[in-house]
Image: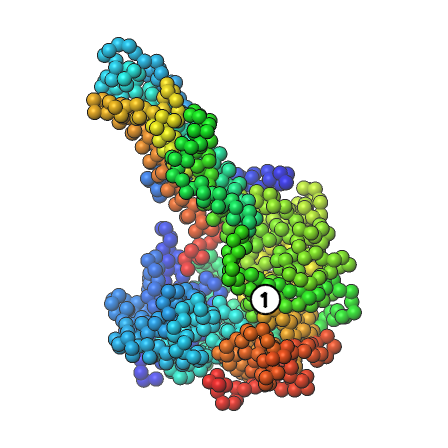
Amino acid sequence: MSEAPLLEVRNLSVSYRQGKIGIPALRDISFTLQAGESLGIIGESGSGKSTLAWAIMRYLGSNGTVDQGSILFRGRDISRASDKEMRALRGDRLTMVYQQPQAALNPSIPLGKQIAEVFTTHRGVGEEDARRRAVEMLERVRINDPARVARLYPHQASGGMQQRVVIAMALATEPDLLLLDEPTTALDVTTQAAVLELLEELRKEFNTTFIFIAHDLAVITRIADRVAVFYAGEMVEHSSLRDLFRSPRHPYTQGLIDCLPARGSGQSRRPLIPIPGRLPSLTNLPPACVFEPRCPYAEADCTVLRPELKEEEDGHATRCLHWRHLVVNEARATFRGDGNQSATEPMPESAAPALLEVHGIAKTFHQGSAGGGLFKGASQHNARVLSAVNLQLARGETIGLVGESGSGKTTLARCVLGLTIADEGTMTFGSRDLPLRLDRRGKDTLRELQMVFQNPDMSLNPRHTIRTILTRPIRLLERLGKRDAEAAARDLLRAVNLDERYMDRFPSQLSGGEKQRVAIARAFATRTKLVICDEPVSGLDVSVQATVLNLLQELQTRWGTAYLFISHDLQVVQYLADRVVVLYKGYIVETGTTDQVYSGPNHPYTELLLSSVPVPDPDAPTAHLALYSETRPEVLDGQGCPFKGRCHRHIGPICDQVFPPFQIVGPGHGVLCHIPIAELPRGAGLGTAVIAGDADPVRL
Amino acid sequence: MSADKPATARSLVRKARPHRARFWLEQARAQPLAAFGAFLVIAWVLIAIFAPLIAPYDPIKGSFHLQDLQAAPSRAHWFGTDDHGRDILSRVIFGSRSVLLLAGISTLASLICGTIVALVSGYYGGAVDEVLMRIADAAMALPAVLLALLILAMFGPGDLGLFSSTVIVFTPLVARVIRSAVLPLADREFIAAAKLRGERGPAIMLRELLPNLLGVLAVEGSIRLGYAIFLIASLGFLGVGVQPPTPDWGVMVSEAQTYASVSPWMVIFPALAISTLVIGVNLVSDGVKQLMLSLEQRGGDAPAAERPTPEAAAT
């Protein structure tokens, strides 16, 4: 402790100029970071967490200025250092990994050369030597066959591989401080888990100090020693990771933890507790406590007295006047503890009349002919996205459809909707045949089958008012008159907890969560029996996510609508779904009730998915499957099991040559695998670390 | 379909009106060049409308007095006279009518035709798109003036010929630009949502796609207007456009070229008229482009709509 801290930020305030007004993006931030420590920064979008990273890197842009305070790096104030000095530090002692690896890599330079450049610029080594070191770096980030990968261009590598290359570049100079700005947000669950595992290992190997910025508490649990929670440009809480999870003190942090679907077996169906209201506008901040307008415990003095970030003897700092009196802690703990409450609704019987039946739906995309026009190219590349998928969905039931990107889940949804025309297969909906083509479907079918898309910015026409958006389907499909349709639209707005005044607004005047609620209202505008939800909350901030999930739950109870819920977030699926279908490369590899799938035994792929979900609990045991699977090459020769290449439980040549049977594990629970059912549980379950204890499986 | 339209329009106007004047004033201050361009264009439009009131002489009737032929600019004839003794100022003033009217109408017509082609092509895609775009490519392969001459040869010189040739020359150009704006829109999910509620193709094109194209159309329209003025003047110069004795700037320049060295005013003033109008239109079009860009960045639709907080812009 006698040494000066590696990084010391003192009373830092940063603002952006916009026209004549200054927008205070960060106010009075102070913290110190010792060498080798790792700090997690949590906050929603607009909380100022990225601004902090840019301020440290001095990348604030032309309209951003440090108004006050200092950033001491090894005792030297870098907020006032010369540009020349900064250039020497950046990319050498101070490095950064960004959210989008595609944006951080130059698309026209091979990966190896991009890493080699770090050595030639910062270390002044020769070309040959730099190239050799680049390959070494690739190996250190667990890339198989690094010499080959070094010659690849960014577009030839997968997203996870690209991000690992970016991390290799950032670590190449063995920097003192590595800033990670949401490095896994744009990645798939399994890839995210792999990158997190890798970072955890690299931190030990390189002994680098990390600042890890994320919007999701669960992501940083395995990496951070300490956590700082940001809200509206202020640090509202700062403590050790364990303290923060055990006893969050600031109401905002408590809210952040409470709005996540709880983990545990079975559906608890406990309503999520969203944080009411929204982030205040930075130009019009509350005068005293910034969280006061949304705080459930706010008292009279909260609007007058400005709370300071006060550090207690235990090293836990909170910016709240009343945290001592928030006795909710204990109550909250008991409330969260009862996750195992039996499901509140009777499980839909498989004997119940099916609402939707899908038989043998298959889809192959033909690539290589742009637009599929007149002149079809001779060299076509065919991608089989769905292979003979069967699915049954009962009335009022929710099926969670999970899988990585590219697993075919969105294509399956679009085939059911008729937006994509399946190549083969049949479907029935209600008691009718469901034609594959949308234009062959009658009004009754259209009315009963609707969709909520992922991104409301894309799914709501920016030029239409909410009134038009909601009344149009009612008038077209329900054939109501103008007056009745408007009354119905107003009812819908109320049903999704939006004010009637929103009728005349345009989507751009609504927040992200409000827009998604309008999109949900539109899906329910007609007498809908099945709503297909394609990742409806993945674009939203966590606190808003809870509101939307609760709303979906509420509407289902009210109208008995069935959901086909697509998500990569297994916790969300566990919260909502009655049954789960796991897709891999267009094959259903496992189906079962939520309980069955979440308690196992599982297909190895499901096991991988489940082990990849970041757990917001620092002491939870983990199985290190993701990095293993991520570093194995995918084998797509059309023979044997589709998952054989990445499988950690590969049992021999049978997997490579014979297509696996669909084995029945229990009533309604099946698995597409060669491993005998009796042996499946060996690796199943979340708690058992399968191969983590063995010799490093990654280097196999 | 039209029943709920008034509601949309009304709500738009209600919000926009109180701020509209201030909004344009702010824009003018932010873009002085565009404001100057707008001044030039508005001036020419006013001149065209009030031509009979402003023009000091009859633009067609000449004079047989020798001193009136090719007279240099003087107090009586500010811009001088031509070889028929006609007042050039009056002819320039009246000449603005044919060029503005023809260019305006044919630009509007080519915008409409081009947008229809673009919507059909971009929305349906596939073979329809392929066929339409290859036809457009073929039309664009020929130089504009050459193609216009070919068409004029079919229709014969005159207003109808000029109109049709401008429309035929510009439609593929407009279609190309608008199509590229339609393509990303057609992939947006609000189109899928419209299909899911059983909207037909034409309804999707008009109700869902077209309103999102207004910005691009404004930019494209202002660019095309500049080119149309130029094309019509060029055709007039070549003698296949507006027919004498109707005053037309292109024709005036062309007739005067033989006298350019003796009476330069005969060339200078109509040429100046063409260039001020074209420059004005181009400056306005740059301004419109800039305006659309800034509106897009601010994520707004209507100029004065209430806007969300600026955090997004700050990050």
Residue found at the very far left of the displayed protein? B262
The residue drawn where x is 56% and y is 86% is A690
Q: Is residue A662 left or right of residue A545?
A: right
Q: Which residue is mark 1?
A: A384
Q: Position of residue B290 (x, y in %)?
A: 39, 45
Placement of A312 over or under A62, stated as above or below: below
Q: Nearer the viewer, residue B260 or B103?
A: B260
Residue found at the very far front of the displayed protein? A378
Q: Is residue B10 left or right of residue A183?
A: right
Q: Is residue A276 visible?
A: no
The residue drawn where x is 63% and y is 46% is B200
Which chain contains the residue that carries disc 1? A
Q: Nearer the viewer, residue A488 or B98?
A: B98
Number of numbered discs visible in the structure rendering: 1
Is disc 1 surrounded by few (<14), some (14 to 19) or many (20+) residues within 10 Å?
some
Q: Position of residue B24 (x, y in %)?
A: 41, 39
The residue drawn where x is 36% and y is 51% is A20
Residue found at the very far bottom of the displayed protein? A694
Which quarter of the rendering shows the N terminus of chain A?
bottom left
Quarter of the image holding residue A213?
bottom left
Q: Position of residue A623 (x, y in %)?
A: 55, 83
Circle 1: residue type: Arg
Q: Is residue A201 visible?
A: yes
Q: Nearer the viewer, residue A610 or A117?
A: A117
Placement of A282 over or under A466, stated as above or below: below
The residue drawn where x is 37% and y is 42% is B286
Q: Secondary structure at mark 1?
A: strand
Q: Position of residue A27 (x, y in %)?
A: 39, 64
Q: Is residue B11 left or right of residue A319?
A: right
